[in-house]
């Protein structure tokens, strides 16, 4: 009476053995155990079996179900193992293959210089702050003691923007990072130690000027800050950045509306060879000074209690000097040959102990 059960077992075993992948396996499972599967139909038909045979038939069917379920699951495990083996084999890596040349990205020299600046001033306690590229006239000029019609405005070749909708405030593309000083002093009570790095804009374009360039500004405000602190800080920075421990540094009296006194900073070099550190010539590298009391007062800081110093420099300029890059224009041309030559390994980050 149970011939049909044996047949089903034999057939299922054969079908399972013939199922080469999980898809074929699933078809077998559904044909046997699915809603209209052979075994399911047999169980459904149990009610039609004469009552005296029903008990035995029922028990036999349940045993068969357990047996078939186990066989089906076992085959599934086998097929899964085989699939995994095949995948591992296909994904095997050959570590002896040579690397593909020029496939990794490189750090742009501007970004690298900004990282180095942040590492050096960071070690002196400065944090890096950011500011918007489009500034109001007041942040870019007025608060920095450069009122309308001040002759210093003429030096800046400013890009003027229309006022924002609903406002009459004149806007400019920031001509320097100095508005970052104002934003910092308005946002934060002293003591302050920050640098501001970012894009700046002036309507100027030739081999040494670009309408968009980068600057780094610094601002330190504390009680009893002196010119001595300014000089020590900038001498340390320049010697570390250019990795020349005895780099000659000269402070030359100058004028900026937002500092008093103001100083231009020069480093020693050889004008003929371009070599830094010796040669008896001087090269202007950055502007600096003690923050003008009026600028402090504009930001609500009492100049009788707090003093500070500030500096600003062009990132492209010091990058060109440090790495012997002669032309400014390729900085912005995205020429991969240039980048391959001057770019930096991203996996070798700036570290102070290397003496950047
Ligand atoms: N903002 C000046 C410029 O772009 C540079 C500068 C000079 C910044 C003196 C300063 C400073 O913070 O103290 O030409």
Image (tube, rainbow, N blue to C red):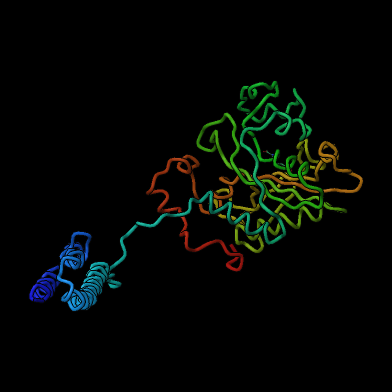
Tell me: 34 left or right of 108. Answer: left
Residue 167 spot, x, y in % from top left: 69, 22
Closest to the observer: 223 or 49? Answer: 49
Instruction: Examine the rendered structure and indicate whether residue 187 appears above or below residue 127.
Output: above
For the point 62% across and 61% down, the residue is 244
| Residue 186: percent from left, percent from top | 78, 41
Residue positioned 87% across, 53% down in the render? 223
Q: Considering depth in this image, is 136 or 286 the residue closer to the camera?
A: 136
> Up-down: is 106 above or below 145?
below
Q: Quick one: quadrant of the C terminus?
A: bottom right
Q: Is residue 313 left or right of residue 331?
A: right
Q: Is residue 269 visible?
A: yes
Residue 23 occupies quadrant: bottom left
Kindly tell me whether residue 85 is visible in this rendering.
no
Percent x, y of residue 72: 21, 72
Q: Residue at x 20, y 64 (%)?
A: 44
Give the quarter the ligand 1 occupies.
Answer: top right
Judged left or right of residue 3, residue 233 is right
The residue lying furthest to the right in this view is 304
Decide if residue 99 is on the left or right side of residue 111.
left
Vertically, is 13 above or below 190? below
Tell how many labels.
Answer: 0
Quarter of the image where the N terminus is located = bottom left
Residue nearest the viewer, comparing 50 with 306:
50
Q: x%, y% of residue 150?
A: 76, 26
Front-most of residues 254 and 107: 107
């Amino acid at each position: 009476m149970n011939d049909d059960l044996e047949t089903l077992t034999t057939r299922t075993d054969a079908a399972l053995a013939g199922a080469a992948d999980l898809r074929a396996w699933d078809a077998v499972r559904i044909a046997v155990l699915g809603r209209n599967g052979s075994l399911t139909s047999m169980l459904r038909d149990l009610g039609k079996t004469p009552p005296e045979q029903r008990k035995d038939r029922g028990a036999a069917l349940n045993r068969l179900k357990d047996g078939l379920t186990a066989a089906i699951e076992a085959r599934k495990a086998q097929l899964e193992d085989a699939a995994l083996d095949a995948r591992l084999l296909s994904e095997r890596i050959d570590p002896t293959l040579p690397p593909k040349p020029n496939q990794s990205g490189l750090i742009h020299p501007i970004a690298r210089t900004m990282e180095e600046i942040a590492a050096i001033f960071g070690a002196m306690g400065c944090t890096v702050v950011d500011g918007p590229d489009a500034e109001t006239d007041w942040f870019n000029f007025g608060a920095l003691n450069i009122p309308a019609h001040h002759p210093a405005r003429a030096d800046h070749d400013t890009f003027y923007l229309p006022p924002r909708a609903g406002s009459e405030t004149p806007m400019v593309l920031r001509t320097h990072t100095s508005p970052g000083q104002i934003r910092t002093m308005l946002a934060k009570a002293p003591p302050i130690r920050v640098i501001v790095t970012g894009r700046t804009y002036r309507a100027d374009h030739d081999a040494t000027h670009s309408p968009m360039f980068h600057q780094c500004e610094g601002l330190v405000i504390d009680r009893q800050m002196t010119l001595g602190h300014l000089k020590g800080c900038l001498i340390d920075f320049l010697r570390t950045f250019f990795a020349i421990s005895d780099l000659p540094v000269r402070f030359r009296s100058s004028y900026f509306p937002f500092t008093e006194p103001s100083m231009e900073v020069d480093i020693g070099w050889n004008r003929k060879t371009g070599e830094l550190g010796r040669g008896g010539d001087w090269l202007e590298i950055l502007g600096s000074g003690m923050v003008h009391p009026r600028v402090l007062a504009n930001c609500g800081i009492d100049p009788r209690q707090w003093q500070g110093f500030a500096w600003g420099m062009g990132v492209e300029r010091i990058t060109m000097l440090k790495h012997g890059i002669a032309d400014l224009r390729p900085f912005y041309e995205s020429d991969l040959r240039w980048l391959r030559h001057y770019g930096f390994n991203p996996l070798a980050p700036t570290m102070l102990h290397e003496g950047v």
